[in-house]
Image (tube, rainbow, N blue to C red):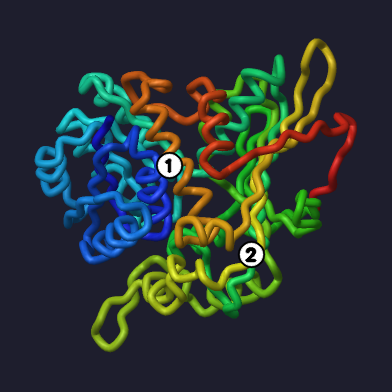
Amino acid sequence: MSKILIIGAGGVSRVAVKKCAMNSKVFSEIILASRTKSKCDLIASEIKDELHVEIKTAQVDANNVPELVTLIKEVKPDLVMNIALPYQDLTIMDACIQTGVDYLDTANYEHPDTAKFEYKEQWAKNEEFKKAGIMALLGSGFDPGVTNVFCAYADQYLFDEINYIDILDCNAGDHGYAFATNFNPEINLREVSSNGRYWQEGMWYETQPMEYMMKWDYPEIGVKDSYLLYHEEMESLVKNIKGLKRIRFFMTFGQSYLTHMKCLENVGMLRIDEVEVNGVKVVPLELLAKLLPDPASLGPRTVGQTNIGCVIEGTKDGQRKKVYIYNTCDHQTCYKETGAQAVSYTTGVPAMIGAKMLLESKWKGKGVFNMENFDAKPFMDELSVQGLPWKVIQMDADETYEVK
């Protein structure tokens, strides 16, 4: 029996709140807060109608630490779930430190003015969380999140040593628009248009955007072009998976998406600095985000599947071993259950599971932690129960695939 405060009211939040409501024995009281309270009220109304669970709502500016502190002191939650924008990670963490409440998020901190993704500033709060006697769980989404847990599960139960990891993210969904993003447009387009990076033999190597591609046969979907990007879970896995020699991240993109994105980049619409238009200062990417379809509106019209997983290679009992751990999700199945498409679903469900791990004390500690810092099995067990079943395929350890 626990009380939680969830901050953020987008598509991922809709999933997380509904899944918490479906697990009311653990989440006995839920408060949903956002800058726009009407969005919270809409989600609360849906849950009351569908699940007969009461959700309280509140208004808060997640960029304002005093406002956050006031709300947390008023609510007195056992845990704050940050499902707002990554720009707001640090302010919400600071509010949790001041109020002595555990913290969870789904993505690492991003500075609004710099397209850079790293855990440095969040990890720096480790001592403050320890002194406050509380815990922060970072990146409890899918990637980061479940992918970290897949790697931890392999490290703890399947291998004696892991040497190579490739994280593979495929969204084969079709929303019918000429161009749209499946999650926050600013975050999505900043991520995809940034330089790629991978880690090998103790060093980070930077690549140009979309410089490297491979064709991968995704189970239940088929062969898709997959491009090397940088993704934040690699930073913590490099730190926590001993014996690692190389880790890479690949994501699928269709040619139409890449053509649109390149055109927008060429005309300056992906810029994150201000430009003046008729005396008004405008950030081009923020304007573009307002013009594109709201990702939360894509659920009814998105069909197809996602497939996200990890190809992991290492040794077991002196022998080379390679496995592929993955999940597939159907967009329409997710929409029928939660009113959101699979990209939101695959982030919102793990957010709920991560919170469940903390509230049931299956994962506990004082300080700042990543997902792979704990026993993976209870989280993996919950994935299958909560709508994200996973599979393990044994692969030929000598099989290679070309990246060009």
Q: Is residue 134 in view?
A: yes
Q: Where does residue 38 sit, x and y in percent of width and height?
A: 23, 66
Q: Residue at x 27, y 88 (%)?
A: 278
Q: Residue at x 71, y 19 (%)?
A: 159
Q: Where does residue 213 sit, x and y in percent of width and height?
A: 75, 55
Badge 2 marks a residue whose secondary structure is loop
In the picture, measured across the screen, residue 364 lies left or right of residue 35, that is right
Q: With respect to residue 129, does 46 lie above or below?
A: below
Q: Residue at x 75, y 56 (%)?
A: 221
Badge 1 marks a residue whose secondary structure is helix
Observer-nearest of 356 and 52: 52
Observer-nearest of 121 and 166: 166
Farthest-out residue, top: 317
Looking at the rendered structure, the number of numbered marks drawn on it comes to 2
Q: With respect to residue 379, does 54 lie above or below?
A: below
Observer-nearest of 351 and 278: 351
Residue 280 badge:
none
| Amino acid type of the residue that numbered disc 2 sits on in the rendered structure | Gly
Q: Where does residue 71 sit, x and y in percent of width and height?
A: 13, 45
Q: Mark 2 sits on what residue?
A: 173
Residue 351 badge:
1
Q: Where does residue 168 sit, x and y in percent of width and height?
A: 68, 46
Q: With respect to residue 288, does 173 lie above or below?
A: above
| Amino acid type of the residue that numbered disc 1 sits on in the rendered structure | Ala
